[in-house]
Amino acid sequence: MSTVKVAVHGLGNIGKAVIDCLLCTRDIDCLGVVRRASSLGTQPLSLRGVPDYASIDALMAERGRPDVVIICGPSRNVPVDARYYMEKNISTVDSFDIHSEIPQVVAALDSAAKAAGKACITAAGWDPGTDSVLRALFEAMTPVGTTFTNFGRGRSMGHSVAARAVSGVENACSITIPIGGGKHSRLVYVLPAAGASFADIKQRIAADPYFSNDPLDVREVGSQEELDAVADNSHGVLMERIGASGSVSNQRLSFDMRIDNPALTAQVLVSCARAVTQLNPGCHTLIDVPPVALLPGDRMKNIARLV
């Protein structure tokens, strides 16, 4: 069994969880973490013995070229970061999660990937990601109908990162609350930086595309301890479809899960790091990837076991 060599870009919540998943995976070797030079040597418990480097060039000089970089930074940085690594002759996977921008990102990264002769997988978390595959399968089973994807109640990694990026915010946590029918509200807890105006922060968050299309409640907290009390990693989804197979209607499909958000996102990314090495050059999403490519082991054995 060949080993996939992987490097991790970033050591936030997702990066830490990716390291945990990689260390539990037999057919993938984690070469190291690329992070800011000012952060090197910090968070040793999160690194768990994995070396960290200030650049991919420094990592390659010591550990060799990775087959894949798992990008664990903010979604808004993904297009630039993925292009950079592919130009270094390295495939990438990421969990870009701004749904409305995914078609443009796929088109841009597809051109970059083909120019570099590499493959990448974008939007590879659980939503977008594995939920996208389930929505596609639901439509294949019941072509005429309606699918509702109801998230939460739980902490959204992407929305929390977006809130923390707002000027004047020291730290923040965004909770997704399902309303029903595929609609959601956002509850954002904000710890303002010293001297920052909470009223100004609230306006900036409301104007951000991550939050501007949903009902929004922004609340101020007075300490990190108060924020920690609401910022657990639990999340989940209930996906439901009522549709028709041929002329037969009232087909009812559902999928329900309750999960630790960073852990599941990280596991999908690690599975995609395995799969991307088997794909043709270009940019792919999870609905483009054969499920068997996500699994370790022999293809025919997996077919015998699962089909």
Image (cartoon, grey):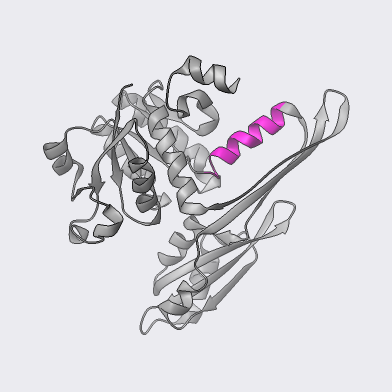
Q: Look at 53% across and 26% down and name the residue there.
A: 291
- Total marks shown come to 0
Give the farthest residue toward the top.
Answer: 300
- Asked if residue 96 is among those painted magenta in the image, a careful observer would answer no
12 or 304: nearer the viewer: 304
272 or 299: nearer the viewer: 299
Q: Is residue 96 left or right of residue 137?
A: left
Q: Is residue 146 left or right of residue 94?
A: right
Quadrant for the N terminus in the image:
top left
Q: Look at 35% across and 56% down and name the residue there.
A: 12
- Asked if residue 132 is among those painted magenta in the image, a careful observer would answer yes
Horizontal and vertical percent position of residue 196: 40, 81
Residue 306: image quadrant is top right
Q: Look at 28% across and 30% down and name the residue there.
A: 67
Horizontal and vertical percent position of residue 182: 70, 51
Give the farthest residue toward the left.
Answer: 61
Q: Is residue 241 above or below residue 142?
A: below
Q: Is residue 279 above or below residue 224?
A: above
What secondary structure prevails in the magenta region? helix
Residue 145: image quadrant is top right
Asked whether the viewer can see residue 306, the reply is yes
Horizontal and vertical percent position of residue 214: 63, 61
Horizontal and vertical percent position of residue 252: 80, 37
Q: Is residue 51 left or right of residue 144?
A: left
Q: Is residue 82 above or below residue 187?
A: above
Asked whether the viewer can see residue 96, the reply is no
Give the residues drawn in magenta, as a range: 126-140
